[in-house]
Every structure is written in structure tokens, then in C-alpha cells.
Image (cartoon, helix red, strand yellow):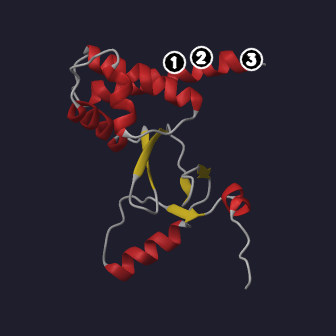
Amino acid sequence: MQSNETSKNLDASVIADKIRAVFDETSQRRTRTRELIEKRLVELATSGADFTIDDLWQAMRQEMPRLGRATVYRALEKLVNMGLLGRIEFADGTHHYRVCGDRHHHHLTCTQCHCVVELDVCLPEDQFAAIGNQTKFDIEGHSLTLFGRCEDCRNQQEPATTL
């Protein structure tokens, strides 16, 4: 049985390989910027943290002060389009990113604290087919985000006082 540390290192290695493969597949040169993106995303993936583009950009600027925000944005969008990063939408219109890998899943997000829970549930294929038939669309993909308040936020709500 592998220890947690070995498991994390293996996962980090797999994630780094997948990021490199995406950049290679989209004809991206190996640059210091892309290596730094890879390094930061591996750190975020092993911690399970989600992040914004600005979070990542500001962290990377510690090592590369002249790094442009648009460069980070374009790299992240490539990783989202290739399925390695997930974009997590919040009820208020903001979004975060998370390294999700290959496993198909959806998200449940708290409308107060923005905590995120990954869900291994999906609509049945026949429902997608019915939606496609009804709307005359060829369904090519989907994303489902559920919104609600987590248990901690519900418990913090002060009881209403009566007059």
C-alpha cells in the first residue's frame, strides 16, 4: 500500500504530465511561464484548492514580475478546453478554477462561503437525447453546477427574533 505522500507525488507527476501534454498538443512551446503555470497548478491540485485567475497570476508574479494576466488567462483557457481544469461557477456570477483531471463530475457550491463539493452524479443519457430532440440541438457537452447553502453557513444563520 502506498503512503499518502507517495500517492500525492504520483498524482503530482501525472498532473504535470497531463499539463505538458495539453501544451504540446496545442503547439505551445516549453517556456518558463508555462513551466511556472505547471508548477503552480500541481501545487494547487495536490492541495485540492480552487483558485481565480488573479490568485494564480499574483502568485506567479512573485517569481515573474513582468508576467501578463492575459498570458495566464490564455493558458488556463487551453487547459479548461482540453478538460484538465474545471471552471466552477458561483451563483453570484463569479467563477474559480480547479484541477479536475479526467473524471467526469459536477459541482455544488455554497452561495455564502463559496465552498465547493464535487458530485459524481449526472443526468441520464436519455435525458440529454430528449433535450436535444426537443430543442433540435446536437448536445456536444454539458456542465452542471448546483447552488445552495452548506451546513456551516446554515448553522451560522442567526435565528429570527420575534417582536
* In the rendered image, the vertical position of residue 28 relative to residue 83, given as above or below: above
Q: Which residue is mark 2?
A: 9
Q: Which residue is mark 1?
A: 13
**Observer able to see residue 130:** yes
Label 2 sits on a secondary structure element that is helix
Q: Earlier in the sequence, mark 3 or mark 2?
A: 3
Q: CA distance from mark 3 to mark 2?
A: 10 Å
Measuring from the top left, give residue 36's x and y in whole percent.
35, 18
User: 26 or 49: nearer the eye?
Assistant: 49
CB under 8 Å between discs 1 and 3: no
User: 18 or 149: nearer the eye?
Assistant: 149
Measuring from the top left, give residue 98's x and y in whole percent.
47, 40
User: Who's the residue at 42% across and 27% down the image?
Assistant: 18
Q: Amino acid at mark 1?
A: Ser
User: 138 or 30: nearer the eye?
Assistant: 30
**Observer able to see residue 17:** no
What crowding class fits label 2: few (fewer than 14 Cα within 10 Å), some (14-19), or many (20 or more)? some
Measuring from the top left, give residue 61's x and y in whole percent.
31, 22
Apparent side of residue 23 relative to residue 49 in the rendered image (left or right):
left
Q: Residue furthest bottom?
A: 163
User: Who's the residue at 71% across and 76% down the image?
Assistant: 160
Q: Residue furthest front?
A: 163
Q: Amino acid at mark 3?
A: Ser
Label 1 sits on a secondary structure element that is helix
CB under 8 Å between discs 2 and 1: yes
Q: Which residue is mark 3?
A: 3
Apparent side of residue 99 relative to residue 153 in the rendered image (left or right):
left
Apparent side of residue 144 relative to residue 156 in the rendered image (left or right):
left
Q: Amino acid at mark 2?
A: Asn
Q: Quadrant of the C terminus?
A: bottom right
User: Who's the residue at 22% across and 19% down the image?
Assistant: 29
